[in-house]
Amino acid sequence: MFFPRRPQAGLSTLEDIASSSGGQEIQGAGELGGQQFGAAFTAKAMTAESRSEPGAVVAFLEGCYPMAVMFNTATGAWTSAQAQAAIAAADRTNVFRALEGLPGQTEVPVVVESAKALGDAIGKVASSAGRALVQSSVAPMCADMRLVDVSRSPAVPVDIYEAATKTSPDHLLIVAPFLGQKDSKPEICCDGILANGELVFSAFSEKARVASEPPYEDLRIVTSDDLDPGVREAARDVAAQLAAKLGVRNCVFHAEFWVTGNGPQLSDFMTRPGGGLIPEMVKAKWGVDLRAAHVYASFAMADELARIAREAKTAPEQVAIGSLYSAPGKTAMMLGNDERATLAEDKRVIAYSVVSEFSNSAVGSNDSRGALCVRGGDSAGAVAALDDIAARFGLV
């Protein structure tokens, strides 16, 4: 989104910030090359404010960060340090390299640059998992995965490396241990806010279900009040230390962890709100609009980040979100006006999105039909409510 002027202080939702500061979506912002360049400078031409208070492009996806850096540095909205931090956090290879040396992070993804390094990395992974996931450093973390049985093939042949790097122009790969929900182990998410380098808000949820085949899409995520306090504190520490190593001081972040006998092990980290309906889940459970905080973070308004964190109020009910796919052997119902009205009347439903004609085949995923965010009395009840509503429409 493009915000032509600094947002007004004291606002708590993205809608209010966009309304007060003229924020608007930039069409084609996620596309590459010339279109990205053109979108940025179209936004620049729209700026009517004084150069003493330049507007800014706020990126909500990693693919949009190059455009945001280009525009925001050109107008002076970002310092070189802010730009470098934004790019560093958007590159997963930087993230996993920064993990090296962090206390307790021994079962985490590894960056490799050659066939030999890939073999060494899988050998390292073998100490904590019987299998490893090999994936491109450029493709989304959920895509283009290759599962390797390290107990049978501890040394990775050159042909596997060459095949994997076909979708990674920089010939960098990520090797991750096969852990978490896909291996029937606990996996958690931490969504938080950093202000002036201090972690001022954190919200935890658990992955309740993931797909059984690559790329292991998250199917159900649910909030929980029962997570071990020690695990929470350790995860918060890792996220804060990692952000500091990346040079990030003001941000919204989404982090994911495998929970092992060695504590929470970071598996993903991004300095933006989590994808899908994660922001709606956090807002419903804790009353914090992460998208609003993300805009303030892009303008380095640390006081506003701290204020939003102070406004957090925990609701007694739990909240579940789910990505929805066509059930095997069933025809998924398209949501017309009657179906939408049914969802609107269901008091359990907080938010939903519908994908009528869409294919994830380009990244190797199943066809997504939409997403749901619902409430329930406890974690199990929230997931059950989501499953019940999804089943009505032939979805899982």
Image: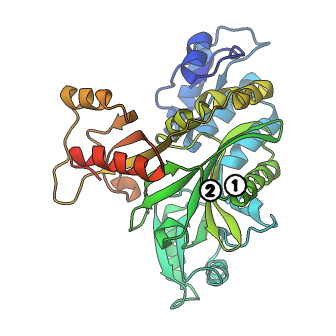
Res 6 → quadrant: top right
Q: Is 10 on the left or on the right of 328, as rendered?
A: right
> Disc 2 marks which residue?
227
* Label 2 or label 1, whichever comes before in sequence order: 2
User: How many angstroms separate mark 2 from mark 1 (CA)?
Assistant: 7 Å
Kindly identify the amino acid type of the residue bearing the numbered disc 1: Arg
- Tell me, yes or no, if residue 273 can be seen here: yes
Say what amino acid the circle numbered 2 marks. Leu
Q: Secondary structure at mark 2?
A: loop
Residue 61 image position (x, y, % from top left): 56, 40
Q: Which mark is residue 232?
A: 1
The residue depicted at 62 percent of the width and 56 percent of the height is: 227
From the viewer's side, name the closer residue of 118 and 165: 118
Q: Nearer the viewer, residue 135 or 126?
A: 126
Relative height, residue 161 to residue 388 (above, below): below
Label 2: few (<14), some (14–19) or many (≥20) C-alpha neighbours in 10 Å: few
